[in-house]
Amino acid sequence: MSYLFRNFDKVMPFFWEHLSLTFTSLLIALCIALPLGFLTAKFRKLQTPITGVLGIIYTIPSMALYAALIPYTGLGTTTAMIGLVAYAQMILVRNIAAAIKGIDPMMIEAAKGMGMSKGQIVAKIELPLAVPVVIAGIRVATVSIISIGTVAAWIGAGGLGRLIYQGLNHDHTGKIVAGTVTIAILAIAADLLFRAIEKILSPRTH
Amino acid sequence: MGIVFNNVVKQYPNTASPAVDDVSLEIKEGEFIVFLGPSGCGKTTLLKMVNRLYDPTSGTISIDGVDIRHVQAEQLRRGIGYVIQQNGLFPHMTIEANIAVVPRLLNWDEAKIDKRIDELLELVHLDPKVFRKRRPSQLSGGQQQRVGIARALAADPKVMLMDEPFGAIDAITRSSLQEELQRIQRLTKKTILFVTHDVEEAFRLADRIIIMQAGKVVQFAAPYDILMQPANDFIRQLVGERDVYRKMGFLKVEDVYASGDEAAAASEGVSLNDDLKLVFNRMVEERVREYPVVDANNRRVGFVTMDLILTKLAN
């Protein structure tokens, strides 16, 4: 632990790298998962193929996936992000679809009966009601991106994983501990942040 | 002008018989109409065709002379109040936002909406100061349904559709909501189409009752006429032909009294408008067999006896 406190300025750049890798991947993942999740919820026929493919990707070990990607996209951040985005899809798409399907059909009927158009029903009823569940999915996805992101250091994506690899290579326990503890803090902080957002956005239930 | 159903048929795909089978009806403006029947009789389908949640397979429905197929569905629905079983309120919106939904869809200005919310909450006896900012989940079932009614009235529609609105509410609260709804209807003169499978509720609320069976309208008449002349055995069973007490509730003194003044003038008179249930109760309680009858100006017009009541009920 003493390494972390004495070399705080050396650890911080790794921390920022990890943070930016996480949130960039998350953003890209969401851009893909939102329409996919919506389609999965609305069209039953798409459900099995989409969740099937995503499920298969999810079961591939991260090291193996990166090894398979390197011949095509090389070493570095791009490859790392492709992997992270792919892993997050399974969690995000499933949650988004569940969130939309979980809305009481009576709610939709009331909205329709009051004269809302399809677009208004999505914007004013379905999305606001789905958001808390979607945020829960984002929370889980973020935490797993943070942890898999550690492995991504192995293919040169930077981040706190690099600190751990340095420690492993140089037999430097201080670096390993510093990297591990910082990743844990990052993951816990992200979890707490999204839990708070979830709570604020949920309809009050008392 | 009211609402006119013309040979309306609704056949769902992959079903043997139509859900609504050749229904023709004329509903007058300002009438309180109850659709009564067992589940699966087509009453809800018929209701939901009025705001085009379903479209008829054939036949036409017109409101005030305009065929509703010629009105854009969303436009039509914004002009018709719609109340469903509890849970119809949007849980992520405050009470005021729930009530404001249709006025906002119609682009009312905010000051007008604001005033209207207070007006409506007062109409359904909920204090705006207390309830405006609350969420539906913070209200009891009865309070939620009051808000549901207020929300349906928001844009002052001429027609209200109510789909078993009090079905999931306990008996005591339901009774007070029914009273409230009658008061509101007298006040606002809306045309109300109300679906229920509760016979008591139907007889209590309706100006006229539409009784449905297997997609067909088997009788469309005032509660009193249905009790006195049920159209078939199914209705006889449904309304409980032997329920003399309910029958008496729909008969008034003016339906049975005899003119003349033979009756004992000693007891206090009953009025022409009193229902027979009330008079009969008094007879039993006071062990009296006859009362003088007075008109609205408290003038003696005749008498009513237990025999006269029994003769009427035997018809």
Image (cartoon, coloured by chain):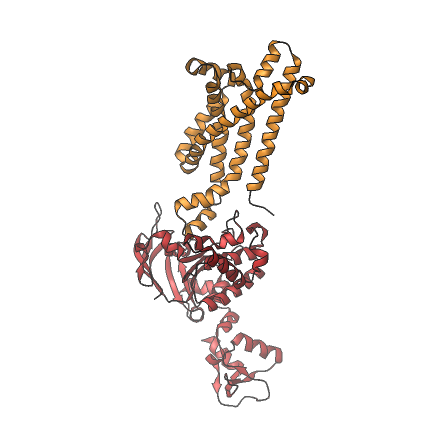
Chain colours: A orange, B red
- Residue B165 x/y as whole percent: 49, 57
Decide: is B44 above or below B303. above
Decide: is B298 above or below B36. below
Q: Residue furthest front?
A: A9
Quadrant where the image shows the N terminus of chain B: bottom left
Horizontal relation, residue A2 to residue B169: left or right? right
Q: Residue furthest right?
A: A2
Decide: is B309 above or below B56. below
- Residue B276 x/y as whole percent: 52, 76
Quadrant where the image shows the C terminus of chain B: bottom left
Q: Residue furthest top?
A: A170
Q: Viewer-proximal residue, B300 or A106? A: A106
> How many labels, in total?
0
* Residue displayed at 47% across by 80% down: B254
* Residue displayed at 64% across by 22% down: A181
* Residue displayed at 57% across by 56% down: B131
- Residue A64 x/y as whole percent: 49, 15
Q: Viewer-proximal residue, B83 or A71? A: A71
* Residue displayed at 58% across by 84% down: B268
Residue B164: in sight, yes or no? no
Residue A63: in sight, yes or no? yes
Q: Viewer-proximal residue, B53 or A129? A: A129
- Residue A44 x/y as whole percent: 41, 36
Q: Viewer-proximal residue, A146 or A182? A: A182
